[in-house]
Amino acid sequence: MALDKRFFEIAQKRLENRRMANKQTEDSRRMEIHRKIPKYCELENKLADTMTNIVAAVAARASDSEAQVRGAVNSNLAIQREMEKLLVENGYPSDYLAPVFTCAKCRDTGTFEGEWCDCFNKILNTAAAEDMNSHSPLRLSSFDTFKTEYYSTTVDPDFGETPRNIMQNNYKECRQFADEFNGRGYGLFMMGNTGLGKTHLSLAIANELIQKGYCVIYGSVPELLRRLDKEQFKNAEGDTMELVTNCELLILDDLGAENNTDRYTSLLYEMINARQSRSMPMIINTNLETEQVKARYQDRLWSRLFSMNVLLFCGEDNRLKLNYK
């Protein structure tokens, strides 16, 4: 992955902080057990003695050294079992004092079998995503500030339902999406005029998932395509395509506001197809109507958009009432 060196430095630092935090947890647990279960400390000393006996027996090379080693090993195992039993009897898991690792696969080293571990790649991608999101409004919206009472209770003839009922359903769909998110699925395609809450609910989902530790990237389609175009066709530094196709959730805002060129459409298709082919979810927002989407994009692209869970937004522009869109 051709990412800026500073992201690797950030990732390495976060990995080191993770190791330090886990070591503090280990030390805290050990002090707790020594304080509450003095006998455990005695058993630890006995265990250390058996290790000394094993080393001494091996070094002596006496005729009975093999029997001495076997006896010391058996004693060592018996003490370990007694220590585990003592923990359980006092209400602790038997492995309470085992080494603590956030990633059991690489044991928090960041590498596994000579390659970067998945956990390190996630830290790395998250650092790069945070940089991409640094100028986005990711922290400005939440589910708590989405107010359905601002939507009309008069039936909309185009929908055969009241805007309030429709938006209450959209809220529930988005809330469920955030609650059940696991990094798989096609995601949501939100359609409707400006000021109806598409971006607000998208960012509310993003905030929920970021708090759960997922890697989320938000970007307006015009800005994102300009960035991709510079990197792929004008030799600008960066690998945005790698990031947007591998983050756990990609949010594309304002689809249809980008320049309508073959190159932009090709980049958009590459991005969406790469994620859908691996069942990686997206949230895509547009102010376009269904027929406008079909007229603007080729079949292979719009068919992928409508394969997502489509949420239709209706009502009046609420930005005069609330500070969101």
Image (cartoon, rainbow, N blue to C red):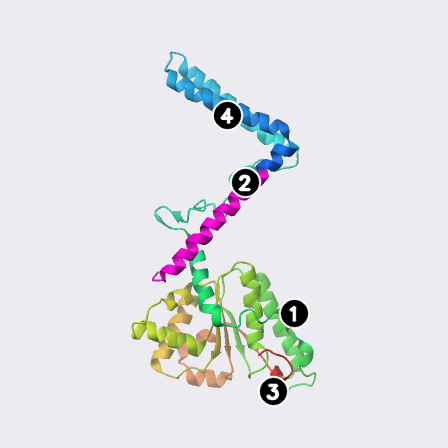
Q: Which residue is mark 2?
A: 26
| Residue mark closest to the camera, 2 vs 3 | 2
The residue where tag 1 is placed is 144
Residue of label 4: 48
Assign the magenta stretch its main secondary structure. helix
Circle 1 packing at 10 Å, graded few (<14), some (14-19), many (20+), is few
C-alpha span from label 2 to label 3:
62 Å
The numbered mark at residue 37 is none
Q: In the figure, residue 176 lies in which quadrant?
A: bottom right
Give the answer, above or below, for where 184 lies relative to 313.
above
Residue 218 visible in the shown view: no
Name the kind of residue labelled 2 in the image: Glu
Callout 4 touching callout 3 (CB < 8 Å)? no
Residue 26 sits inside the magenta stretch: yes
Q: Give the Cα distance between marks 2 and 4.
A: 19 Å
Q: Nearer the viewer, mark 1 or mark 3?
A: 1
> Mark 2 or mark 4, which has the lower sequence index?
2
**What kind of element bears circle 3?**
loop
Which region of the structure is painted magenta?
Answer: 1-29
